[in-house]
């Protein structure tokens, strides 16, 4: 009976400004089809008559003018909500869009928007909405994700910047597949899921990322006018990270801070920047639709993100391949936070404080299940000096591989790679990220 029920279309009607919230886990899917009116999912419009397959998502279909749609399959949660903060989100977008129009006409600063707030208030969702609305206006904003814990355009534990020039895909959202943008995301490997785990390294990567973004914007005025939308970790703006928070604002030259769902934080930030008329602080309410995700669910999402990198999505499957490499043909480094024992140096002698340094990793069974980041830096026969360390830490990545087996006796390592080809003679970076294929 259940199966029969699930294979039937069920019709829903929304009045203007209503939204239909629904949740589907990763193992099942529903098909949704708009039949009348207009509707959007986090700012991306649904086309009439097209069947969208939704899987592993907690989302809402919102309508500005009313609509009718049909759903086939069983949602874990489904209900219609009358109250949403969408009007205030749209107004925020309009204000940002005005900044863009202004630079085109009379110069000024491009919008550099940063979204902050506590866990589960809809920060990532708001980023998506602002991006989709910008794209609808013909803009190509840079989506900057400095939250290593989730992974949006690629696997978790990375910091990324992606030019978004199409609406976000309704079925795949911000997936790891390169098709989301005509440009591959700029990816830096952090290797940890929490910024607090390695603050110095995290800071260094933020420097690199902001420099690269600045270069990109200097070269490409279309991207520059569109501006930045920065999605942040949920612990960035709590009291213990205040210095980090202000340094992100400086590094990315943020001029609009959006605080979602936290009055006190809004007030603190507003007070802090009250004499700075370069920075606007905006307060937005949390949507009642945002779903709290406990740590086990977050782990599931992280694992799915990694799986997606190697195997693709249900819409676009990938076939990864395994390759066996000799120990002597791979070059793995890990980044350590150095401690500089300057007190041990003779008075008057200064040593360059090395905040991060690279350490060679000999393959061992400990590597099994690790994710390695393949850098674009050629292996040199000479020893690394500080400068080379620096290059390697801030390098753009070619991709990731997964260690599936290490045979210490035969000195062979088995790697799962997303696409065919030889493993190039480049350095790989190892950190904390492990994945067990299920
Ligand atoms: P964190 O910073 O803790 O990672 P966040 O503040 O970025 O979280 P989101 O990831 O945007 O929060 O939202 C949490 C979950 O709620 C997501 O699964 C998102 O798709 C879902 N969600 C957001 N808004 C709605 C809505 N209006 N209806 C249904 N689900 C929603």
Image (cartoon, rainbow, N blue to C red):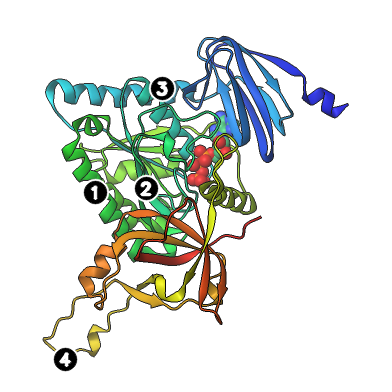
Residue 361 drawn at (x, y percent): 42, 76
Question: Which badge, 3 or 1, is on the more N-terminal residue?
Answer: 3
Mark 1–mark 2 distance (CA, rounded to whole Å):
11 Å
Is the C-beta of the residue carrying label 3 under 8 Å from the nearest atom of ligand 1? no
Residue labelled with disc 4 = 346
The image quadrant of residue 205 is: bottom left
Question: Which badge, 4 or 1, is on the more N-terminal residue?
Answer: 1
Q: Secondary structure at mark 3?
A: helix
Mark 2–mark 3 distance (CA, rounded to whole Å):
25 Å
Q: Residues within 10 Å of mark 2 (few under 14, many from 20)?
A: many
Question: Which badge, 4 or 2, is on the more N-terminal residue?
Answer: 2
- Residue 121 visible in the current orientation: no
Residue labelled with disc 1 = 212
| In the image, farthest residue toward the right | 1
Q: Nearer the viewer, residue 322 or 429?
A: 322
Residue labelled with disc 2 = 160
Residue labelled with disc 3 = 90
| Left or right of residue 141: residue 410 | right
Q: Quadrant of ligand 1?
A: top right
Check if mark 4's residue and mark 2's residue have beta carbons within 8 Å.
no
Q: Quadrant of the C terminus?
A: bottom right
Q: Height in image: 363 above or below 423?
A: below
Mark 3–mark 4 distance (CA, rounded to whole Å):
61 Å
Residue 44 drawn at (x, y percent): 47, 24
The image quadrant of residue 99 is: top left
Mark 4–mark 2 distance (CA, rounded to whole Å):
42 Å
């Amino acid at each position: 009976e259940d199966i029969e029920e699930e294979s039937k279309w069920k019709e829903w009607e929304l009045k203007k400004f209503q939204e239909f919230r629904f949740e589907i886990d990763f193992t099942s899917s529903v098909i949704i089809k708009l039949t009348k009116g207009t509707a959007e999912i986090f700012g991306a419009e649904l086309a009439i008559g097209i069947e969208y397959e939704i899987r592993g998502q907690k989302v809402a279909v919102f309508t500005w003018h009313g609509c009718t749609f049909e759903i086939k399959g069983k949602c874990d949660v489904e209900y219609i909500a009358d109250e949403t903060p969408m009007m205030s989100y749209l107004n925020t977008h309009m204000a940002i869009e005005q900044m863009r129009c202004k630079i085109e006409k009379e110069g000024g600063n491009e919008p550099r928007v940063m979204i902050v707030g506590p866990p589960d208030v809809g920060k990532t969702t708001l980023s998506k909405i602002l991006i989709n609305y910008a794209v609808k206006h013909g803009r190509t904003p840079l989506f900057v994700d400095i939250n290593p814990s989730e992974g949006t355009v690629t696997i978790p534990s990375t910091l990324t910047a992606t030019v978004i020039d199409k609406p976000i895909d309704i079925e795949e959202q911000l997936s790891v597949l390169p098709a989301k943008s005509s440009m591959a995301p700029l990816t830096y490997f952090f290797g940890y899921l929490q910024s607090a785990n390695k603050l110095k390294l995290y800071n260094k990567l933020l420097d690199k990322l902001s420099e690269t973004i600045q270069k990109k914007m200097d070269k490409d005025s279309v991207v520059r006018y569109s501006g930045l939308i920065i999605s942040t970790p949920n612990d960035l703006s709590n009291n213990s990270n205040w210095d980090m928070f202000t340094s992100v604002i400086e590094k990315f030259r943020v001029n609009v801070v959006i605080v979602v769902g936290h009055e006190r934080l809004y007030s603190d930030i507003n007070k802090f920047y009250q004499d700075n008329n370069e920075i606007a602080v905006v307060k937005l309410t949390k949507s009642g639709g945002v779903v709290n995700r406990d740590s086990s669910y977050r782990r599931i999402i992280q694992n799915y993100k990694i799986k997606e990198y190697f195997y693709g999505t249900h819409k676009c499957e990938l076939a990864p391949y395994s390759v066996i490499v000799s120990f002597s043909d791979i070059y793995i480094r890990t980044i350590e936070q150095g401690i500089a024992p300057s007190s041990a140096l003779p008075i008057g002698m200064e040593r360059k404080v090395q905040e991060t340094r690279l350490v060679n990793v000999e393959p061992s069974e400990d590597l099994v299940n690790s994710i390695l980041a393949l850098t674009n830096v050629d292996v040199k026969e000479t020893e690394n000096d500080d400068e080379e360390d620096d290059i390697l830490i801030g390098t753009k990545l070619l991709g990731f591989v997964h260690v599936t087996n290490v045979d210490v006796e035969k000195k062979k390592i088995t790697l799962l790679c997303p696409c065919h080809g030889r493993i190039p003679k480049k350095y790989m970076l190892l950190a904390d990220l492990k994945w067990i294929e299920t």
